[in-house]
Image (cartoon, helix red, strand yellow):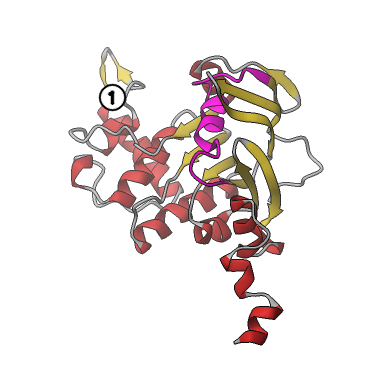
Amino acid sequence: MAHQSAAPLLALRGIRKRYGAVQALADVDLDIHAGEVVALVGDNGAGKSTLVKVIAGVDPADRGTIAWEGRTVHLTRPHDAQGLGIATVYQDLALCDNLDVVGNLFLGRELRRFGLLDEVEMERRTLGLLHSFAIRMPSVRLPVASLSGGQRQTIAISRSLIGEPRLVLLDEPTAALGIEQTAQVLNVVDRLRERGLGVLLISHNLGDVKAVADSVAVLRLGRNNGFFDVTTTSYEQIVSSITGATDNAVTRRTSPEWEADR
C-alpha cells in the first residue's frame, strides 16, 4: 500500500454533476495513491458510474477540482484522461468476439513493420504482458468468443495496460463471474497494485472488496458517506454506510440485545 503521506496520484475535491433536475454528484472528494486499491461502493443510483465517467473524461464535472500528482488538471474528454495515464475498463468490456486475444489487445494500436501488421511483435508483447500478470490463456490466437467470462475480463484489463497507464478504473470486473474466474481477476488486481499502479475498483461484492482493496469510499445519493481502512473496518460498518442506516438487519443481529433475546 502506498504511503499516505505522499501526494495522491489523483485527488478529487468538491466534484458536482447534475443531469437536469437530478443532482448525480454533490461535493464528492476522493484520493487515490499509487500502489493502492480503492474500492468505490454504494447502492444503485449512488453515483459510482457517474464518478467514473468524470475521471475518465467521458462526462466532465460541472464543478470541483481534479489534481494529478498535486497539479490541477481538466478532464473534458477521454483523451485528456488517457494522456495522464488513466485507463478505464467498463463493465460491458467492448471486446470484439471475432478477433483473437492479440487482435483485441492491439485493436486501434496495431504495430506495423514495413507498412504491414507486425503480428510477430504483437504476439510477443501479448505473451509477455499476460505472463507478467500471471494470466493463463490456452492460446492468444483463440477467438475471444470461445473464452470464459473470467478470461475475457482479464483480456479487457490487459488491453488497458498496453498504453502503460498509472491509474486503472475497473467497473464491476467480477460481476456475473464464478468463484474461480473471480479469483483470477482479483489476482490481476493484486498485481496491478504490486506494480505501483493506482486502482479504483467499483464493486457491489464486499467479499471482493475485503479481499483486495486497501480502502473503501462509500457514495450514497451522490455524496460521500464514509471512508474506511479495509483492515480495521467490519462488513457491518460498510453496509451501514451504504444504506445510510445505523440500525439495520445486519447490525441488529450483532447487537447485545439480539444475542440476549436468542
> Which residue is located at x 46 percent, y 50 percent?
188
> Which residue is located at x 61 percent, y 30 percent?
25
Judged left or right of residue 82, residue 237 is: right
**Residue that carries the numbered disc 1 in the rendered image:** 118
Q: Is residue 179 above or below residue 225?
A: below
The quarter of the picture where residue 167 lies is top right
Q: Is residue 59 above or below residue 139?
A: above
For label 1, the crowd category at 10 Å Cα-Cα, with few meaning under 14, some 14 to 19 and many 20 or more, is few
- Look at the numbered disc 1 and give the secondary structure of its residue: loop
Farthest right residue in view: 5
> Which residue is located at x 70 percent, y 22 percent?
64
Closest to the observer, 159 or 233: 233
Closest to the observer, 147 or 103: 147
Residue 206 appears in view: yes
Closest to the observer, 56 or 120: 56
- x then y, percent, for residue 169: 52, 37
The quarter of the picture where residue 51 lies is top right
Q: Amino acid at mark 1?
A: Asp
Q: Is residue 23 above or below residue 261?
A: above
Whether the magenta-drawn stretch holds residue 61 is answered as yes
> Which residue is located at x 51 percent, y 15 percent?
77
- x then y, percent, for residue 196: 62, 43
Whether the magenta-drawn stretch holds residue 13 is answered as no
Judged left or right of residue 70, residue 150 is: left
Judged left or right of residue 247, residue 113 is: left
Q: Which residues are magenta?
A: 41-63
